[in-house]
Image (cartoon, grey):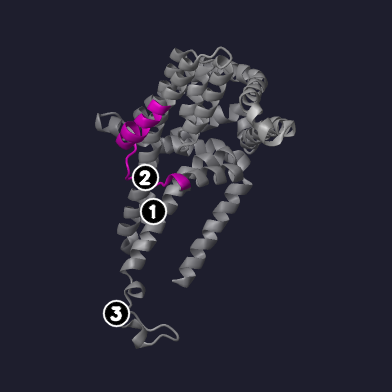
């Protein structure tokens, strides 16, 4: 048992080391693997309808590539223009927010600590905003430079569909081969764990993707109807970041409220400020009570804190490749840990009926009275 554990840990360490060293060229292959994994159920369904595996694979990937190209041509330029405009207006928005804060809180702070406190407040707010912007830009830069494939867009767009095509075409054969490699006496356990991991990953990714799409559309439409500047862009950002629990809603709320205050506070338009807040209140209520329970459910087994840690840690270590691997790795670790705890609770070590440990006596195992 000890030898097998050492061998397994050694193999895992080598794989992690290779992934880290090759992270700059891994993105197209990891993206192709993820794409094949997510599209395999659709290919199986087309096979059941009478299509061959090759035809089903070609149809699925052709549709995906066409949709992706349309997205790049139409949506990306619009979003890029909106992001550039938002970045250009952000300093002015921050300045107006500082002025509003000093105007409203300044007299109270002057009575409490003098004009020096007001000056320190302005300096602290400016420093905080500047540091936050610097950190965000540095994080985006680390994701961009962390994988050379992002710099070479042609590599990502050309290699990924080819990898996905071959993996999707041979997916069932590869799974069957992996199953044959497992020792027969361990196959039921391995199949059970693989099924739980598959259920957790697919349940979260597909369900949370729909949640992101629905909430992003809701926030974008709601903020647009309210009349908020860059409302559509803020709604899209909120929906995209909803993949990380609570981060999307909090980010969108802070951005929208800040823009709303800078836009409507000088005119005293409290109605539109309240409507902006109301959009996120309604969206959060729908997400927590209707959308997420229906689409994601509680059976996924990914705790929000564990998921956030996995995304940030893997993104920091491996760049964009880490973001693709974070969810399946986090789900796999969660399933294995739950399985280990289950086996421990069933073991003689937990029940106390195994052989005596070093220094242990029979009296120590006798039940005690409260």
Residue 282 shown in magenta: yes
Q: Secondary structure at mark 3?
A: loop
Instruction: Give residue 200's mark.
Output: 2
Label 1 or label 2, whichever comes before in sequence order: 2
Circles 1 and 2 in contact, beta carbons < 8 Å: yes
Q: Can you say which quadrant of the picture contains the N terminus?
A: bottom left
> In the rendered image of this protein, does residue 176 appear above or below residue 217?
below
Q: Residues within 10 Å of mark 2 (few under 14, many from 20)?
A: many
The residue to which callout 1 is attached is 335
Residue 314 location (% of width, % of height): 55, 45
Q: Residue furthest left?
A: 49
Q: Identify the residue at image location x=45%, y=85%.
A: 358
Q: Nearer the viewer, residue 370 or 211?
A: 370
Give the Cα distance between marks 1 and 2: 9 Å
Q: Are marks 3 and 2 in contact (CB under 8 Å)?
A: no
Q: Where residue 179 sits in the image (x, y, percent)?
A: 36, 53
Work out whether residue 64 or residue 362 is closer to the camera in this orientation and state it: 362
Question: Mark 3 or mark 2, which has the lower sequence index?
Answer: 2
Where on the picture, by quarter, is residue 111?
top right
Residue 68 screen position, x and y as percent:
47, 22
Looking at the image, is mark 3 or mark 2 nearer the viewer?
Answer: 3
Residue underneath mark 3: 369
Q: Answer whether residue 324 is magenta in the image.
A: no
Q: How many marks?
A: 3
Range of magenta residues? 281-305
């Amino acid at each position: 048992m000890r030898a097998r554990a050492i061998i397994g840990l050694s193999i895992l360490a080598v794989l992690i080391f290779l992934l880290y060293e090759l992270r700059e060229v891994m993105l197209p292959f990891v993206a192709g693997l993820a794409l094949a994994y997510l599209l395999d159920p659709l290919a199986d369904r087309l096979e059941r309808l009478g299509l061959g595996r090759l035809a089903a694979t070609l149809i699925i990937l052709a549709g995906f590539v066409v949709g992706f190209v349309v997205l790049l041509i139409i949506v990306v330029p619009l979003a890029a223009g909106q992001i550039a405009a938002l970045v250009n207006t952000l300093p002015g928005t921050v300045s107006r927010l500082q002025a509003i804060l000093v105007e409203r809180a300044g007299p109270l702070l002057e009575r409490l600590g003098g004009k020096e406190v007001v000056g320190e407040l302005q300096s602290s707010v400016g420093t905080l905003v500047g540091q936050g912007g610097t950190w965000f830009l540095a994080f985006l830069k680390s994701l961009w430079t962390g994988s050379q494939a992002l710099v070479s867009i042609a590599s990502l767009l050309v290699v990924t569909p080819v990898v996905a095509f071959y993996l999707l075409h041979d997916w069932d054969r590869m799974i069957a081969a992996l199953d044959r490699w497992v020792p027969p006496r361990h196959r039921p356990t391995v199949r059970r764990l693989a099924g739980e991991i598959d259920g957790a990953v697919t349940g979260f990714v597909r369900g949370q993707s729909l949640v992101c799409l629905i909430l992003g559309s809701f926030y974008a439409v709601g903020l647009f109807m309210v009349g908020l500047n860059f409302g559509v862009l803020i709604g899209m950002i909120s929906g995209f970041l909803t993949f990380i629990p609570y981060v999307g809603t909090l980010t969108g709320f802070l951005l929208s409220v800040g823009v709303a205050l800078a836009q409507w506070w000088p005119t005293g338009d409290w109605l539109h400020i309240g409507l902006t807040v109301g959009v996120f209140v309604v969206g959060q209520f729908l997400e927590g009570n209707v959308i997420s329970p229906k689409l994601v459910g509680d059976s996924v087994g990914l705790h929000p804190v564990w998921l956030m840690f996995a995304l940030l840690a893997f993104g920091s270590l491996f760049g964009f490749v880490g973001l693709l691997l974070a969810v399946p790795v986090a789900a796999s670790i969660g399933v294995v840990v739950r399985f280990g705890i289950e086996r421990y609770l069933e073991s003689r070590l937990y029940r106390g009926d195994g052989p005596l440990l070093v220094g242990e006596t029979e009296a120590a195992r006798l039940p005690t009275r409260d």
